[in-house]
């Protein structure tokens, strides 16, 4: 069966520091991969999605970037964090063309 | 721009009550509507609705899609404290790569 791993679970970083959040999926090939951010326990905002290795689509302009170096690995990065980057970051996967998204357990990021 | 609106934003009920959560949408090239339950961490998938008028059911939870009214409802009967969570509605549209979420309904079930 498919599983998704996301780490770390929580992170406290100072303003201006770099960020790297990692997500891996097991048990499936060529999934669509997604990064979402959730502020204040509410709706999810799509940040990036990827339909294949090296293929990244950005949904909102921001201080973040994403990469997909391997088929089942998705990384969210920042060179310099801002206070406004604080939030709950969720990685998700789906099987093309239109299956439900399945989420990882999320990373709670606090930028101080 | 795709839009998904949920109501109410929050709801407090007592155990045993029945609740109805609403979701309406305006999207380009609708594919399907999904419901998720989120407790403390990851949203967990509940239902995926593609066709109008066909009810999906899982235990005390059920959901139905009305494509004419561009809306869906999620019903929970005989609520329990364990049903307390944020319920998220999302719509899959376009090339099926885009999942747009509503802001969620915070349900609190009191003993």
Image (spheres, coloured by chain):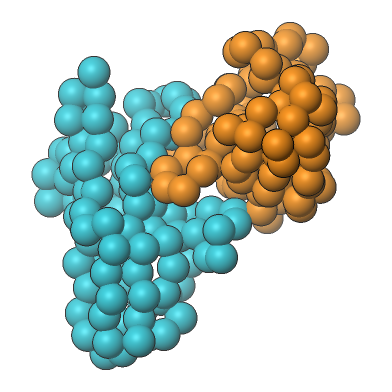
Q: Is residue A9 above or below residue B14?
A: below
Quadrant housing residue B75: top right
Q: Quick check: A55 left or right of B81?
A: left
Q: Quick check: B74 left or right of B84?
A: right
Q: Quick check: B40 left or right of B59?
A: left
Please report the residue visible at 22 percent of the width from the left and 85 percent of the height from the top: A17
Q: In the current view of this chain or complex, which residue is farthest to the right?
A: B69
| Residue B14 visible in rendering | yes
- Give whichever of B13, A71 is nearer the camera: B13
Q: Is residue B64 above or below residue A40?
A: above
| Residue A79 visible in rendering | no
Q: Spot the orange chain and give its letter.
A: B
- Give whichever of B65, B63 is nearer the camera: B63
Q: Is residue B44 above or below residue B7?
A: above
| Total residue callouts | 0
Task: Please identify the quadrant where the N terminus of chain A is shown.
Answer: top left
Instruction: Specify the colour of chain A.
Output: cyan
- Give whichever of B32, B86 is nearer the camera: B86
Please report the residue visible at 43 percent of the width from the left and 54 percent of the height from the top: A36
Q: In the current view of this chain or complex, which residue is farthest to the bottom?
A: A16
Q: In the current view of this chain or complex, which residue is farthest to the left?
A: A70
Rendering coords of residue B59 (x, y %): 62, 12
Rendering coords of residue A86 (x, y %): 41, 74
Q: Is residue A66 above or below residue B64?
A: below
Q: Quick check: B69 left or right of A29?
A: right
Please report the residue visible at 69 percent of the width from the left and 44 percent of the height from the top: B108
Quadrant housing residue B33: top right
Rendering coords of residue A63 (x, y %): 36, 78
Task: Please identify the quadrant where the C terminus of chain A is shown.
Answer: bottom left
Please report the residue visible at 12 percent of the width from the left and 44 percent of the height from the top: A70
Rendering coords of residue B106 (x, y %): 68, 48
């Amino acid at each position: 069966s498919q599983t998704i791993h996301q780490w770390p679970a929580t992170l406290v970083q100072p303003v201006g520091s770099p960020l790297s959040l990692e997500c891996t999926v097991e048990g499936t090939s060529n999934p669509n991969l997604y990064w979402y951010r959730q502020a204040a326990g509410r709706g999810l905002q799509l940040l990036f999605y990827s339909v294949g290795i090296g293929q990244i689509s950005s949904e909102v302009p921001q201080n973040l970037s994403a990469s997909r170096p391997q088929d089942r690995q998705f990384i969210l990065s920042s060179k310099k964090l801002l206070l406004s980057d604080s939030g709950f970051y969720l990685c998700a996967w789906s099987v093309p063309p239109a299956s439900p998204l399945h989420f990882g357990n999320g990373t709670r990021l606090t930028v101080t | 721009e795709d839009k998904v609106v949920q109501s109410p934003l929050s709801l407090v009920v007592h155990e045993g009550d029945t609740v109805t959560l609403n979701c309406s949408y305006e999207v380009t090239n609708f594919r399907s509507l999904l419901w998720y339950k989120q407790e403390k961490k990851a949203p967990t998938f509940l239902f995926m609705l593609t066709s109008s008028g066909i009810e999906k059911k899982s235990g005390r939870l059920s959901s139905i899609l009305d494509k004419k009214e561009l809306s869906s409802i999620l019903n929970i009967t005989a609520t329990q404290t364990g049903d307390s969570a944020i319920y998220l509605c999302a719509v899959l549209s376009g090339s099926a790569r885009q999942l747009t979420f509503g802001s969620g309904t915070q349900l609190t079930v009191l003993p």
